[in-house]
Amino acid sequence: MSAQNPTHPAAGLRDDMESAGWTVNEFAAHLDVSRNTASRLLNGRCAISPEVALALERIGWSNADFWMRRQASYDLAMARRARQATAVAS
């Protein structure tokens, strides 16, 4: 993951979901989140919260620490990207 083009931590979840044979509704039910939240997560439009990280762990998709580290790395890359954009604009 580079600061120029950071990858959302949920990248690949859609492939995992489809490999499991789940629809978005089923994925949401397994995570105990709304369909809207599941869709936003799968499309990289929301962060992986600690609750979602624990839900992913509960269904056997790695552990919560893994997901939280991925989210923190993404957040840091996005902050660097924003700082670089601000420096260039100044």
Image (tube, helix red, strand yellow):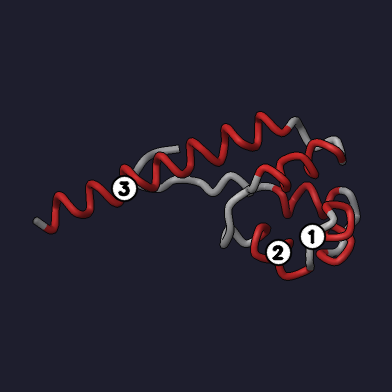
The local secondary structure at tag 1 comes to loop
* Residue closest to the far front: 51
Residue at image mark 3 = 81
Tell me the tag on residue 33.
Answer: 1
How many marks on residues?
A: 3
Q: Earlier in the sequence, mark 3 or mark 2?
A: 2
The three-letter amino acid code for the residue at tag 1 is Val
Left or right of residue 54: residue 25? right
Q: Earlier in the sequence, mark 3 or mark 1?
A: 1
Residue at image mark 2 = 37
- State the residue at coordinates (73%, 61%): 38
Vertical order, 23 against 67 (above or below)? below
Q: Give the alpha-carbon distance from disc 3 to disc 2, as whole Å.
A: 25 Å
Query: Would you identify the image quadrant in which residue 65 lies?
Result: top right
Mark 3 crowdedness (10 Å alpha carbons): few <14, some 14-19, many ≥20: some
- State the residue at coordinates (19%, 54%): 86
Asked if labels 2 and 3 touch by Cβ distance under 8 angstroms, the answer is no
Vertical order, 42 against 87 (above or below)? below
Asked if labels 1 and 2 touch by Cβ distance under 8 angstroms, the answer is yes
Mark 1 crowdedness (10 Å alpha carbons): few <14, some 14-19, many ≥20: some
The local secondary structure at tag 2 comes to helix
Quadrant placement of the N terminus: top left
The three-letter amino acid code for the residue at tag 2 is Thr
The local secondary structure at tag 3 comes to helix
Tell me the tag on residue 22.
Answer: none
Quadrant placement of the C terminus: bottom left
Q: Give the alpha-carbon distance from disc 3 to disc 1, as whole Å.
A: 30 Å
Q: Nearer the viewer, residue 29 or 15?
A: 29
Q: Nearer the viewer, residue 24 or 71?
A: 71
